[in-house]
């Protein structure tokens, strides 16, 4: 099962400025929460390291289509399974609409809980808002790449089917156990606690239905009777030590 995210933001800069900033992929950690690094391996290849919802993920993505001032579409080739596109629409008057379409496949219990709580959707919305604040505060892009990749290919908005090459890597993208509670927040932690508590309560209830069994006490065995024709063994008992008695009948030790 996959999840789709659709988010938009209106930025008060010309479309070329908004687009140019987006082409600076290695600057993404400056406004994308949870993104630790993006490394550009080539004009159409990126390596991502991110921690979202308490789960650390590393993946590589390929740009399937990049059209100047209009669109960047991508799909993962290994690691976390995701794909999507960012489009830029010139609204005139120095305003641009930036729209993000993303589809991803959550993996494991932690990611699925985070998915149910809308963690990724919330993160995407905040990331676009931070992008808006970043580019509007600067007023210009920190850099620009005006090249294109497969322009006119018409790939549309890629879904996870375009990231099929990454599906074999599920569970291999990395995991950060210590950040689970912090990443999912109190709601997810509470949900996990409720599951554990319910399981424990069930075990306690089962145990309570069983009547306790009193410990058995050992009865003393009767003394063994001698077998006919045999004599009981004779046990040598050492003589009791007694104090010497003086001729007058007094105890010498008492006179010391």
Image (cartoon, rainbow, N blue to C red):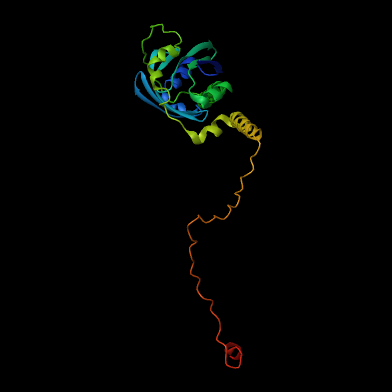
Viewer-side residue, 14 vs 211:
211
Q: Quadrant of residue 203?
A: top right
The residue at 60%/91% (across/down) is 255
**Left or right of 25 on screen, residue 199:** right
Q: Which residue is most to the bottom?
A: 248
Decide: is 49 above or below 73: below
The residue at 50%/11% (across/down) is 89
Viewer-side residue, 169 vs 3:
169
Q: Is residue 184 visible?
A: yes
Say how many tags the image has.
Answer: 0
Q: Which residue is most to the left?
A: 42
Q: Is residue 61 visible?
A: no
* Residue 81: image location, x then y, percent: 43, 19
The residue at 42%/16% (across/down) is 74
Q: Which residue is most to the front?
A: 229
* Residue 61: image location, x then y, percent: 39, 20
* Residue 154: image location, x then y, percent: 41, 6
Viewer-side residue, 46 vs 205:
205
* Residue 131: image location, x then y, percent: 52, 23
Viewer-side residue, 13 vs 197:
197
| Quarter of the image where the C terminus is located | bottom right
The residue at 45%/20% (across/down) is 22
């Amino acid at each position: 099962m996959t999840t789709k995210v659709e988010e938009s933001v209106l930025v008060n800069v010309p479309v070329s400025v908004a687009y140019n900033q987006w082409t600076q992929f290695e600057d993404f950690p400056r406004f994308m929460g949870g993104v630790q690094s993006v490394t550009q391996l080539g004009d159409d290849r990126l390596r991502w390291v991110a921690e979202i919802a308490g789960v650390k993920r590393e993946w590589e993505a390929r740009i399937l289509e990049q059209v100047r001032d209009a669109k960047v579409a991508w799909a993962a080739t290994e690691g976390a399974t995701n794909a999507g596109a960012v489009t830029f629409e010139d609204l005139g008057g120095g305003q641009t609409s930036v729209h993000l379409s993303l589809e991803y496949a959550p993996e494991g219990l932690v990611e699925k809980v985070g998915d149910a709580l809308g963690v990724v959707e919330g993160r995407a919305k905040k990331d676009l808002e931070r992008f808006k604040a970043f580019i509007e505060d600067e007023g210009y892009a920190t850099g620009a790449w005006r090249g294109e990749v497969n322009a006119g290919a018409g790939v549309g908005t890629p879904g996870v089917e375009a990231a099929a090459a990454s599906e074999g890597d599920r569970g291999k993208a990395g995991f950060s156990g210590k950040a689970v509670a912090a990443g999912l927040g109190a709601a997810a932690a509470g949900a996990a606690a409720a599951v554990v508590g319910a399981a424990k309560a069930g075990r306690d209830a089962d145990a309570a239905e069983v009547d306790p069994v009193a410990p058995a006490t050992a009865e003393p065995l009767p003394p063994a009777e001698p077998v006919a024709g045999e004599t009981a063994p004779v046990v040598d008992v050492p003589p009791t030590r007694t104090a010497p008695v003086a001729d007058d009948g007094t105890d010498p030790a008492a006179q010391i």
